[in-house]
Image (spheres, helix red, strand yellow):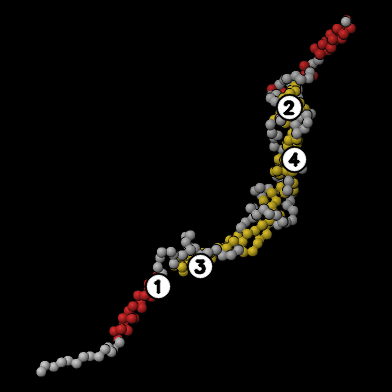
Amino acid sequence: MRAPLCLLLLVAHAVDVLPPNRRKKQVGTGLGGNCTGCVICSEENGCSTCQQKLFLFIRREGIRQYGKCVHDCPPGYFGVRGQEVNRCKKCGATCESCFSQDFCIQCKRRFYLYKGKCLPTCPPGTTAQQSARECQDECELGPWGSWSPCTLNGKACGSAWGLETRVREAGRAGREETAACQVLSESRKCPIRRPCPGERNPNQKKGRRERRPRKDRKQDGRPDARPRRPRLGAG
């Protein structure tokens, strides 16, 4: 009985003489006292193990490093889930933000994003978009479509000059996406000569008015072919 008791006392004494910063599972003030979400957190290195669904983000300063448990990895890092620890890993050298080690979402300055890669120049068949820092496939113009009906202020009837339009669509080479391609269109003047429903054709009215006087004039100039009766004299 004395031997096990002596061994237990020696172990307890050894734990007491250890420096506080070397004790495991000690909750300290790592990262300014922020140990939120940590399972294991030390004063010297911060979090080393996080709760489930959180990511361990390690920030390095020289030879020292500090751990912090976060819900989402900061820009320039991407999350990798593991069986024991979920970690934030750094993106590639040319990526500003990324989805994985091999797929960038946004590039750093002087680089252009193309199919998840950050390139110094855009490949042939693409054009560089300076505002978005992306390489877009060049558009291929298709044939012109048919002319639209001739309209004026949304009406396709009446007697006036209107406009008709046709469209020429453009698509990506070898791709079904056409939203980013510009749609070309052109318009031209066209005559509208169709009466609207419920309206009389002004040309027909004018013709009727002109025919009536001609008929009247023809009747006035026609000699009277009816025989005249003789007058009966007195006596």
Q: Name the residue located 40 percent from the left edge and 70 percent from the top edge.
A: 202
Label 3: how many Cα within 10 Å (few below 14, some 14–19, many 20+):
some
Assign a secondary structure to mark 4.
strand
Residue beneath disc 3? 190
Assign a secondary structure to mark 1.
helix
Residue 214 is at least partly visible in this image: yes
Mark seen at residue 50:
2
- From the viewer's perspective, is the residue at label 1 or at label 3 nearer? 1
Residue type at tag 4 = Ser
Q: Name the residue located 30 percent from the left edge and 87 percent from the top edge.
A: 222
Position of the C terminus, as image quadrant, is bottom left
Assign a secondary structure to mark 3.
strand
Task: Name, please, the residue furthest toward the bottom.
Answer: 235
- From the viewer's perspective, is the residue at label 1 or at label 4 nearer? 1
Alpha carbons under labels 3 and 2: distance apart: 73 Å
* Residue 149 at x, y percent in the picture: 53, 64
Say which of 206 and 178 sits in front: 206
Assign a secondary structure to mark 2.
strand
